[in-house]
Amino acid sequence: MNEILLQYISEHILNNELEEPLEAQDDLLGDGILDSLGMMKLILFIETKYDTKVPPQDMIIENFMTVQHISDYLVKTKVQ
C-alpha cells in the first residue's frame, strides 16, 4: 500500500519534482510536500482506489501526516 501511495503522490501530485525520493516516513504537511489541495487530491485517490469513504472526522493530522500513517489508518479501517 505504501508504494502505491508514494508513487501516486510523486507522479500525480508532485509531478516527479522532488530532488530526493519520497519516503513513507516523510512529513507530508509539516515539510511542505503537500498543501491542502494536494491532500484533497490524495484523499480522492484513496477513496477511488480503495473503494472507501474517508469521513470528515477522520481527516486529521494523525491519520495523514505521513504515507505510513495513511497506510496504518487504512489498515485500521480494514481497507485492503
Image: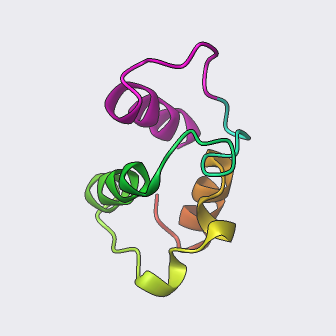
- Farthest bottom residue in view: 57
Q: How is the image coloured?
A: rainbow
User: x and y percent of residue 6 in the render?
Assistant: 52, 34
Residue 16 horizontal side relative to residue 1, left or right: left
Location of residue 23 by image quarter: top right
Would residue 20 be counted in the magenta stretch? yes
Rendered residue at 43%/57% (across/down)? 36
Foreground residue, 33 or 80? 33
User: x and y percent of residue 54 in the render?
Assistant: 40, 74
User: x and y percent of residue 10 in the render?
Assistant: 45, 27
Tell me: residue 40, above or below residue 6. below
Tell me: residue 47, above or below residue 18. below
Location of residue 8 by image quarter: top left
Rendered residue at 41%/29% (across/down)? 14
Rendered residue at 64%/68% (across/down)? 61
Would residue 51 be counted in the magenta stretch? no
User: x and y percent of residue 1 in the render?
Assistant: 52, 43
Tell me: residue 52, above or below residue 13. below
Foreground residue, 16 or 54? 16
Tell me: residue 16, above or below residue 33. above
Residue 69 horizontal side relative to residue 50, left or right: right
- Farthest top residue in view: 19
- Farthest right residue in view: 25
Residue 33 horizontal side relative to residue 38, left or right: right
Q: What residue range appears in magenta?
A: 1-22
Give the number of callouts. Answer: 0
